[in-house]
Image (cartoon, rainbow, N blue to C red):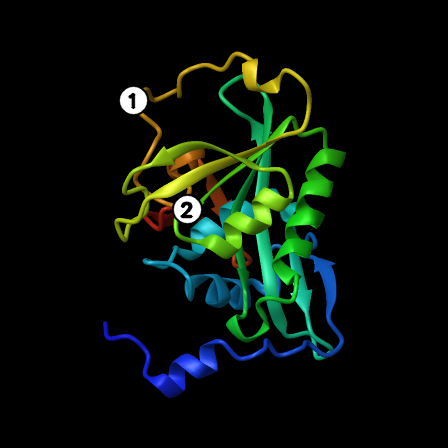
Amino acid sequence: MSGPGKDEAATLVEKPTAVDGLHYVNYGDQRESPYLSAIRQLISQDLSEPYSIYVYRYFLYQWPDLCFMALDKDENLIGVIVCKLEPHRGGPMRGYIAMLATRQQHRGQGIASALVRMAVEKMIAKDADEIALETEVDNEPSLRIYAHLGFIRTKRLHRYYLNGNTAFRLILYLKPGIPYKHTYPPEYGGPSDGGGLMDEDLVARQAAQLQLEDVEGETHDVTGGNTYR
């Protein structure tokens, strides 16, 4: 892909557009929220390969209280963070930031930082021991956000993403002694590093077993395979 021309490059560095009536809300307990498609569209803009709808449902059906959205005065989606919280391999209670995105024209205004803070505070309130995520090694804005919040780089994951890019694993330890807490090998064995955005927590393997029921009463596996009554 060719790089942007001069006019396009100038546009990319213009001052971010302020959001009129910016406010933050929780996703809520409505499974098929009107915002589900907007969340999927916004996050897909930054992915090398789009996720199946069932991946979004995997998170939003089970941890809706760990999804926060930034909206403008007309209730349009400006930014979103999607997380989960569960025991990590029989050890610490681990929060996981799976997805974070803001509209390009509104970046640089602290919206992503505010979303991360809200998610972190919620996970702390739910007794998380640590919070983990992955981000590309050249994603300087994200690395700055997380470093400012106290996340540390614990591992470099070579060719982690589907587009071949390398990632850092970042972890925020919330309690003393958590880095030394014993964990157990994954249930299915084998390495857990590499292979996709959320592979670290074996989301794909867990999701393959999880059955989700949509509003029409059909049951699906989250990999998009079988559909049955």
Can you see residue 218? no
Secondary structure state at the residue bearing disc 1: loop
Residue at the spot of label 2: 222
Q: Earlier in the sequence, mark 2 or mark 1?
A: 1
Amino acid type indicated by mark 1: Gly
Q: Residue at x 40, y 79 (%)?
A: 9
Q: Secondary structure at mark 2?
A: loop
Residue in view at x 69 percent, y 52 percent: 29
Give neighbour class at mark 1: few <14, some 14-19, many 20+ (Cα, 10 Å): few
Name the residue furthest bottom: 7
Position of 115 with respect to 187 (left or right) is right
Question: Front-most of 140 and 37?
Answer: 140
Amino acid on which the number 2 mark rests in the picture? Val
Rendering coords of residue 66 (x, y %): 65, 46
* Residue at image mark 1: 190
Q: Is residue 188 above or below residue 56?
A: above
